[in-house]
Amino acid sequence: MKSYQEMTKEELLQEKAGLEAEYAKIKARGLALDMSRGKPSSEQLDLCMDMLDVIDSKSVLKSENGTDLRNYGIVDGIPEAKRLIAEIVDCKPENVIVYGNSSLNIMYDQISRAMTHGICGNTPWCKLDKVKFLCPVPGYDRHFAVTEHFGIEMINIPMSADGPDMDLVEKYVSEDPAVKGIWCVPKYSNPQGVVYSDDTVRRFANLKPAAADFRIFWDNAYCVHHIYEDKQAQILNILDECEKAGNPDLVFQFCSTSKVSFPGAGIAAISASAANIADIKKQLSFQTIGHDKINQLRHVRYFKDRAGIEAHMMKQAAIIRPKFEMVLDLLEKEIKPLGIGSWVNPLGGYFIGFETLEGCAKAVVAKCKEAGVVLTGAGAPFPYGKDPKDSIIRIAPTYPSLADLTEAANVFVTCVKLVSVEKLLE
Ligand code: PLP
């Protein structure tokens, strides 16, 4: 098979005519499909329903330290929930604060408090002329939305297969005291599924920031979210690496069970150095008397430990793996030989980050929409919604049924081909 770049104008025109006929047929079917939602399917959620039975009106709702969990108190999480989270991210329970139901909410809080009260005694960011954040791209749109909401200037950092461009990160962080943070999704990144290499993690831990209150916002959202049983990524432990590098306070690590148990009804946590934890607790005590400890207990009683979480995630993997594999096989067969797209084959997480020819992403998303297939808006994985090359599309395979996803993925492939041919004919 010839790639589109190798085709003559006549061959491209012929290809275009065939694709237009195919596209017209697809449109006539009046499809209504959605590949935009990075959510678990109801089948995945069904796996966890028994969790709702582990606590009922007869249950003894006491923590292992004797606290009555029906009442106020314990601002930083019950000891057994801290231990469960510590096992997931491999740190000490005393370095964990367990919050409520959302890690994004914790990230928002960290920025909000840095703005109004400062981090570890440093000047509140709102009193500074300029605050900047580094944003590896493509990335998670809600990270960028939080920083934009606080008026923080965002700087794009290109991603490679090993993680963010560390030369650029080191340069900005060491030279500019206005750079106060960086968003990282180190394992199975959203949306590309990139896993940070050991060298990348070590370079992060060894950063020499110009600002004393620079922090790495290490969103380990997909730390246990593997797609395969036999191929699982491991990353270095950022808290340990920072400690080793003599930079213990450099990082805030976030995680949650949103895509382990129930999104919006899981438990979420931050882990960090003793100094950071003490600083956060001091401020947190003004915000709440304690989070939902009964839900924390429910999670511990159901999952028990890391092994319990891992076993559960393998059940989820069995549901999502065929969906990922179907999309990846189709791309491999239909797109790769034509030279009109690239992607990383993810080993975990929730997304496939598809890169079109430059200047094609918006048009592909629009064509899919016209044919009844909803994709995440082009540009969404970039600060300010602006993809400088207009080339990244986030595919979310988990939510639709395999049958719907197969239809949607075929429509997507046709649209990528058609838009690419049109681009090459320009
Ligand atoms: N972080 C990343 C990278 C995500 O992709 C998501 C959800 O898609 C979240 C955080 C949201 O997490 P939570 O439900 O704990 O707020």
Image (tube, rainbow, N blue to C red):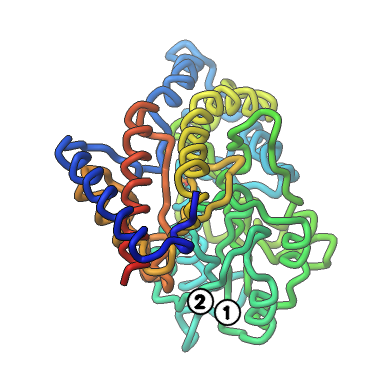
Considering every residue shown, the one lying at the far top of the view is 58
Ligand 1 within 8 Å, label 2 CB: no
Q: In this view, does 334 lie above or below 125?
A: above
Q: Mark 2 is on which residue type?
A: Ile
In this view, the residue in front, 386 or 259, is 386
Q: Mark 1 is on which residue type?
A: Val
In this view, the residue in front, 165 or 390, is 390
Q: Residues within 10 Å of mark 2 (few under 14, many from 20)?
A: some
Residue 184 as seen in the image, left or right of residue 374:
right
- Identify the residue under disc 2: 155
Residue 33: give x, y in percent of width and height.
26, 37
Label disc, if present, on residue 315 of the rendered structure = none
- Mark 1 and mark 2: span between their CA atoms? 9 Å
Ligand 1 within 8 Å, label 1 CB: no
- Identify the residue under disc 1: 179
Q: Do the residues labelled 1 and 2 touch (CB within 8 Å)?
A: yes
Residue 426 as seen in the image, left or right of residue 209:
left
Q: Is residue 66 visible?
A: no
Residue 61: give x, y in percent of width and height.
53, 22
Q: Which of marks 1 and 2 is in front?
A: 2
In this view, the residue in front, 340 or 161, is 340
Residue 34: give x, y in percent of width and height.
30, 40
Residue 130 as seen in the image, left or right of residue 41:
right
Q: Is residue 72 above or below residue 181?
A: above
- For image coordinates 65% across by 80% down, the residue present is 211
* Quadrant assignment, res 387: bottom left
Marks 1 and 2, the one that precedes in the sequence: 2
Residue 107 as seen in the image, left or right of residue 411:
right
